Amino acid sequence: MDIETARFNMIEQQIRPWDVLDPAVLELLGTLSREDFVPPQHRALAFVDTQVPLLDGDAQGPCMLEPKVEARLLQELQLQRHEKVLELGTGSGFMAALLAHRSMHVHTLECRAALAHAARENLRRCGVLNVTVHEVNAAEGARGLPGEAPFDAIVLSGSVAEVPRTLLAQLKIGGRLIAIVGTLPIMRARLYTRVGDEAWSELDLFDTVAPRLEGFAEPARFRF
């Protein structure tokens, strides 16, 4: 595989057509080695328009999201270099690396020990020093990181039925939270902005689907 050609095609054929046009985001995607964050057995999928599983034998488990989805989430956050970011769902560490290149510091939470370890190694190997990987249990992860709050931005690297108020409350005024919200077959990427002490705006961005983050409550189901 010609890696640089594959990377170029990923950007031009997948990411740009998804309205990712921020030059800084596109430059970052062209220079950060996504292939170094993909499990070795799936390296051939590094630049393919698909979700890449991170744990063998768990097709519904944690994954790297499609490159176009990662890129669009990053663009919509409009991060600044002075900002502090929280990510829920570290996975391989690639999204944390993207966030780190656009912000001051990233705290990222992962509830699977094997992934937390792999992410630390991936980030170290790629020279990304402004990320702290926190290994937590699923219930802790769903509560965010109140001890480090408030955050300028929060990213959920997976889907939830709804975003809990406890996470929204960890944003600064003007802070943004982005998440994939809903239940199959309908999920949407949604951007929340804290506009007051007890007020948040919401903006639906695009339709997509993603595996569930662990530890978050599911909606009650009616039985007849």
Image: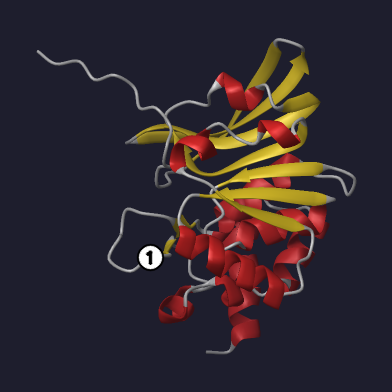
**x, y (%) of residue 114?**
46, 65
Residue, x 40% and y 47% (percent of image)? 211
Residue 206, visible in the rendered structure? no
Q: Quadrant of residue 126?
A: bottom right
Q: Which residue is mark 1?
A: 55
Where residue 208 sits in the image (x, y, percent)? 46, 43
Furthest residue toward right = 82
The colour scheme of the drawn protein is secondary structure
- Image-based side of 120 in relation to 100, left or right: left
Q: In this view of the protein, which residue sits in the foreground, 3 or 39?
A: 39
* Residue 6 lies in quadrant: bottom right
Q: Is residue 90 visible?
A: yes
Q: Quadrant of the C terminus?
A: top left
SS under mark 1: loop
What residue is rendered at 42% in x and 36% in y?
A: 215
Measured along the vertical axis of the image, is residue 112 above or below residue 84? below
Q: Please name the residue shown 73% across and 50% down the image.
A: 106
Q: Amino acid at mark 1?
A: Leu
Seen as rendered, the residue at the extreme top is 198
Q: Position of residue 23 (x, y in %)?
A: 81, 58
Location of residue 173 in the rendering, given as x and y in whole percent from the top left corner: 81, 22
Q: Up-down: is 221 above or below 130?
A: above
Number of callouts in the render? 1
Q: Quadrant of residue 166?
A: top right
Most extreme residue toward the left, as rendered?
A: 224
The residue at 14%/16% (across/down) is 223
Image position of 34 (left or right of 197): left
Using the image, determine if residue 50 lies above or below residue 106. below
User: Foreground: 190 or 199?
Assistant: 199
Q: Residues within 10 Å of mark 1 (few under 14, many from 20)?
A: some
Viewer-side residue, 152 vs 206 = 152
